[in-house]
Amino acid sequence: WATAPTSGLLLNSVEAKGISQQVAELPLLAKSVEAMAEGLNAFMSIDMDVPVPRDAGGGYTHERHKKNGQAIYEAATLYQVTGEQRYADFAVALLLRYADLYPKIGPHPEHKHQAPGKLFWQILNDAVWLVYVIQGYDQLQDVLTPEQKELIARNLLNPYVKYLSVDSSETFNKVHNHGTWAAAAVGMTGLVLGNQEYVDIALKGSAKDGHSGFLKQIEALFSPDGYYTEGPYYQRYALMPFVVFARALDRVQPQWDIFKYRDGVLLKAIYACINLSYNNLFFPLNDAIKDKGLDTIELVYGVDIAYALTKDKGLLSVAANQQQVIVSGDGLLVAQAIAAQQQQPFDYSSMLFRDGANGDEGGVAVLRSDDAKSALVVKAAGQGMGHGHFDRLGWLYYDHGNEIVSDYGAARYLNVVTKRGGVYLPENNTWAKQSIAHNTLVVDERSHFNGKLGKASESSAKVSVFSDKLNAVSVVEANAYPGVSFERTMGLIQTALLDSPLVLDLMTIRSSTKHQYDLPLHYAGQLTYISEQPKVALNTMETLGKKHGYQHLWKKGWLPVNGSAAQVTWLKGNRFYSLNTLLPKDSQILFAELGANDPEFNLRRENALVLRQTGRKDTHFVSVLESHGEYNGVREYTKQPTSQVRGLEHHVDKDLSLVLVELDGGARIVVAKADSVDPDQQHTLAFNGKRYQWRGHLAIFEESSNDGK
Amino acid sequence: WATAPTSGLLLNSVEAKGISQQVAELPLLAKSVEAMAEGLNAFMSIDMDVPVPRDAGGGYTHERHKKNGQAIYEAATLYQVTGEQRYADFAVALLLRYADLYPKIGPHPEHKHQAPGKLFWQILNDAVWLVYVIQGYDQLQDVLTPEQKELIARNLLNPYVKYLSVDSSETFNKVHNHGTWAAAAVGMTGLVLGNQEYVDIALKGSAKDGHSGFLKQIEALFSPDGYYTEGPYYQRYALMPFVVFARALDRVQPQWDIFKYRDGVLLKAIYACINLSYNNLFFPLNDAIKDKGLDTIELVYGVDIAYALTKDKGLLSVAANQQQVIVSGDGLLVAQAIAAQQQQPFDYSSMLFRDGANGDEGGVAVLRSDDAKSALVVKAAGQGMGHGHFDRLGWLYYDHGNEIVSDYGAARYLNVVTKRGGVYLPENNTWAKQSIAHNTLVVDERSHFNGKLGKASESSAKVSVFSDKLNAVSVVEANAYPGVSFERTMGLIQTALLDSPLVLDLMTIRSSTKHQYDLPLHYAGQLTYISEQPKVALNTMETLGKKHGYQHLWKKGWLPVNGSAAQVTWLKGNRFYSLNTLLPKDSQILFAELGANDPEFNLRRENALVLRQTGRKDTHFVSVLESHGEYNGVREYTKQPTSQVRGLEHHVDKDLSLVLVELDGGARIVVAKADSVDPDQQHTLAFNGKRYQWRGHLAIFEESSNDGK
Ligand SMILES: [Zn+2]
Ligand SMILES: [Zn+2]
């Protein structure tokens, strides 16, 4: 039985004993241990193999080394928590094989990148391998003989660290996700071997001057609110080495107080991941696989670690949904707390996540209803590097458990070899990244920045006002199109007049020259009502345009609108959604369906409305989206399948404006807006015999049906 | 507190007391009682109104009388199970209002049908009303004074029965669902009032000769297997008056032994409903709203009653999924059994449901895998009256929780007033009923029977062989097209060679003249692989044809196939599905998408493959559909995204044939078929140096990769 102390990176012998003794009473932990044992037992039943590295990613030696590294970690962990000697024997034997192999190999033969690994074609994979293996080695302290330890350190760990940090110093000192994995590997090895040099260079870079290394990466890669510029999908991925190394450091060398570093940004980054989700799925901003959510392994680490640090009971409900914990001290704490029924709902609330290392590159606003049933996401951030989409001032909307106004995410079938090997598909560039694929303004059928990454990376959108009190945000984009700037004010207006919040969408466009303005709305659901019969493509259908994503949209129908309000209702889940929109003379609502110019049938068949204004300079788009009613097919009733919005007006008077939403029965919601964002400035505007007075950029008034009569 | 005995139609005072005492410990019952109380309390909070009948269906007086009838039942029931006097007072007061109104009114002014009601425009609604109200009246025995009872019987119940059974004797004596409701209303009233005449005419018709009435309806409306010819969606609906009246009769006059009548067909009908479902949803044969399933109120009655009669613990798992029970004696039993954790999985197995009163009008075969994960449905039944679809020999396939090969169901948005008031849409006729909307043969782009109901109703398809041992069925249709007959053999082949059963689809067509044969396959999912690049509509798209449903399909792509096997794979849920099909020279696979000629955007966007053979007389379609692999987006792995079928051959030798399916690795599945359906006939066929010997119509052989080498 294990008694000798380990360094206890994420699991020490006291915790291991605790797991061993309590696992039967802790269902979540039991499930996690069993899953680990099941996978490992299967792996142990095949012959051990530590091949000379040969294959690129996906090939045999690549996959085998990955699995071997994972198995060393798992076997050593299972030895600690079950006491079964066969796990220790297996882990030791495999480790010794690596100690034998490592001195004999050079840089990987298949490398195509600047930074080859030795076991793998990319040094990134080598770093990840060591992060797992060093945790396994740590759990084997009491079974390894002094001679074995010396051998492993001499032949494997020390030269491995040297290869990562010295021979590959360029990657090691990069302020980039690959550098973080390298720092984690080197730093954690230092903690286990008691080699402070390794810890120091991991934290402060090869030169130990802090210009690179883990601390620098914490500063540079997250915004002050813990937002990662590529978006939540990649944030989840990037998070892993940060939280694993930080937690190990915190446990072994608490003097660094790493989770307080930079105002606690690592914890903020974990919370940001959770907050950037709905119904357990991440908001699919930028390149994102839409299946990904809070149950990914990276977030299992994140949540368990965050709970250990904060004891926030809201995290327990996230952990319970994950249906697994890490087999670690923190995982034990989480499983104990859940078994003791301490979990509480996670507190999802309206938040602004500023983007950029200094928080001055725009941001992503998340507006939620008090009951957490509705969420509105407004993106006004930086470009997000190569995985960024051209979607300045775009939005998403979720309600009653469903995606209602959506982003396509990435055009990619992850790991599906019949879809071009599982990589990003051509349609990721030709469709998914283009502005028309998003719920944002497209001018003259060209994407923001003409679809050029370099140009887009030079600037960010701007959040001019964020109010969690009003549940509203104003955002501005001035660079996406030469000579055109646009501002968008969006709100999730909670009012006793309606049983769901009303989405306000007010876009103001300024230009000195005439343009075609398209405002797409990608809706999920089935159309159930259009206020007038559109013209519809019956026997033949053509594309909406030729390029910038328009070539992928079929033009299903078009409805001319001439200076009036139009209404489009769709059904999603058991609920109806109505867009009420006000369009000037010579406008159109286009009905489009994705799927043209798609020779490999790569694109999903999704639907969009496109609000189009033609030949305009300055103009506005004014819409409200209402969630209403209920469709119940089982019990055979339908409630309120039509919008309760019966009138929509927009009144502009110089730098002040009103959006007036009249409901059935005559009550009104009035949104008053000043161009000024000064929170203290007083404004007064008279309209239709009423005076509206407010302070600051925005105000929301409710008028009962008797007001003003 | 209630002590006087009631007739106890579905609830007697002992049971009511049981509910009252145990409800706190029985969550399912508590939920059901609470739901009833919540709805009723809301209704009681508005002013009582018993208006003079005026409006047609959907109008105020119509809806109000419906709600009043329901409220009398609910208030009386809640009085019994809670002891709260206010419920009794309310029910009595409302009943007396009807006793006041009823003598004053004549036939409903809005009637447009031959059979007007008095409270409602259709007598059907009047009958339904009384079925509820008489149950309520029954629960009020101990609170009504003798004078009140006399008044209600004289002014309401007796004249109501007279109106249903004498004044409206044509409906009453109809062998039709409307007649069943009338019989139930009259018979249950007889049971409560102790009026045997009412019971007798309800059971045997006005003339008491058994040519009409409830017993006759039991004989005529269900097949010997309990199948209702309109299909499961309407079967569920039709079931209600049968089970409610039968159960009341069984409790009050058990001497009829009604649930044993005709070999227990009423119980078979309840079980048929359950068996004609997958993942709690009914197979959407004929006109069907696809949301409907085992949790509909009719099946709640059916399951609770069937459990009381059979104590089949498998029914408890269905009841648990329904999440409610009837507030009745049977509901109490179910709630007790579930609370005592007696529930077991319902035993879904392969079954044939013969159609027609005598069971000789074809049938619906349901083939399931042993693990119940897969289900294959083959329809070879009668037309199913006006709600029938032209889909002889069509099939459906479900796997791993999802619909994989689908039927559109009905083109209708039930109760959604913005969709033409919620009625069947024009596209129900132009698309949903047409043969091309189904997974069956279409000859020369015309629907079966040219889409004519009358002609189709004269015949049925035929089930020539059903084998639950082989999990296969052979079906034949000889009347759908003049001069063309087609036979289909389908199987859900379970083999240790594959981890999911293989769907076999072998169609043989005979005609002395040349035709175009289309075999559509409506698949759910995203295409991930096609064995050759099809031609694809890129910038413009046209319809597949002009009529019989073809006008609703866009022609997305087409792949010429010339006497070889082709493969199409799609992803649905976390699994891949591959159609492997063998097509002769000059064939095509068409890729189609629903949605053309749909000016109101009524149709869902669904996808189909159409296998097309042109200019052929006798021919075959030979396909196998494989469920394989796994897509896991959360944990980022994909297994087996390609079919394991690497070869498909069809060998015909006079009246014998072989389908040879070769798998990766060389193992083979061989299906041997004789034209003869004689189960005892011996057959021998040699092919490729091997001899296949079998007895009967069909046999399935497995050959390991070494066989024959
Ligand atoms: Zn996007
Ligand atoms: Zn159908």
Image: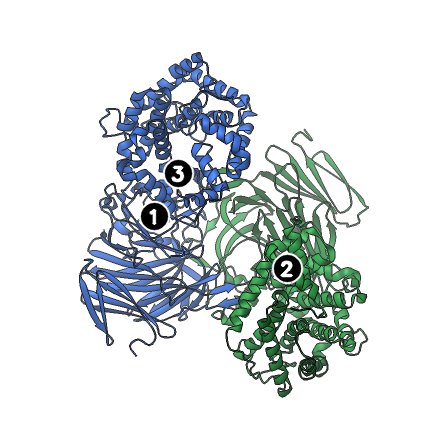
Chain colours: A blue, B green
Amino acid type, mark 3: Gly
Please give the residue where the numbered disc 1 appears in the rendered image: A433
Amino acid type, mark 1: Lys
Residue A220 lies in quadrant: top left
Chain letter, disc 2 residue: B
**What residue is drawn where x is 72% and y is 48%?**
B468
Q: Is residue B445 visible?
A: no
Q: Where does residue B426 sit, x and y in percent of width and height?
A: 53, 69
Q: Quarter of the image for the C terminus of chain B: give it.
A: top right
Estimate how packed mark 2 is, as few (under 14), some (14 to 19) or many (20 or more) residues with alpha carbons within 10 Å.
few
Q: Residue furthest bottom?
A: B104
Circle 2 — which element?
A: helix
Q: Where does residue A432 sit, x and y in percent of width and height?
A: 37, 48
Q: Where does residue B538 sit, x and y in percent of width and height?
A: 42, 53
Please give the residue where the numbered disc 3 appears in the rendered image: A302
Q: Nearer the viewer, mark 2 or mark 1?
A: 2
Chain letter, disc 3 residue: A
Q: Nearer the viewer, mark 1 or mark 3?
A: 3
Q: Which mark is residue A503?
A: none
Circle 3 — which element?
A: helix
**What residue is drawn where x is 55% and y is 47%?**
B561
* The one of A123 and A424 positioned closer to us in this rendering: A123
Horizontal side of residue A445 vs B226, given as left or right: left
* The one of B449 and B500 positioned closer to us in this rendering: B500
Q: Where does residue B263 sit, x and y in percent of width and height?
A: 79, 60
Query: Residues under labels 2 and 1: Cα distance?
Result: 63 Å
Please give the residue where the numbered disc 2 appears in the rendered image: B21
Q: Where in the image, quadrant-wise, is ligand 2 located? A: bottom right
Horizontal side of residue A316 vs B660, given as left or right: left
**What residue is drawn where x is 28% and y is 59%?**
A489
The reply to whether callout 2 and callout 1 are in contact (CB within 8 Å) is: no
Count all numbered tags in the image, as a single digit: 3
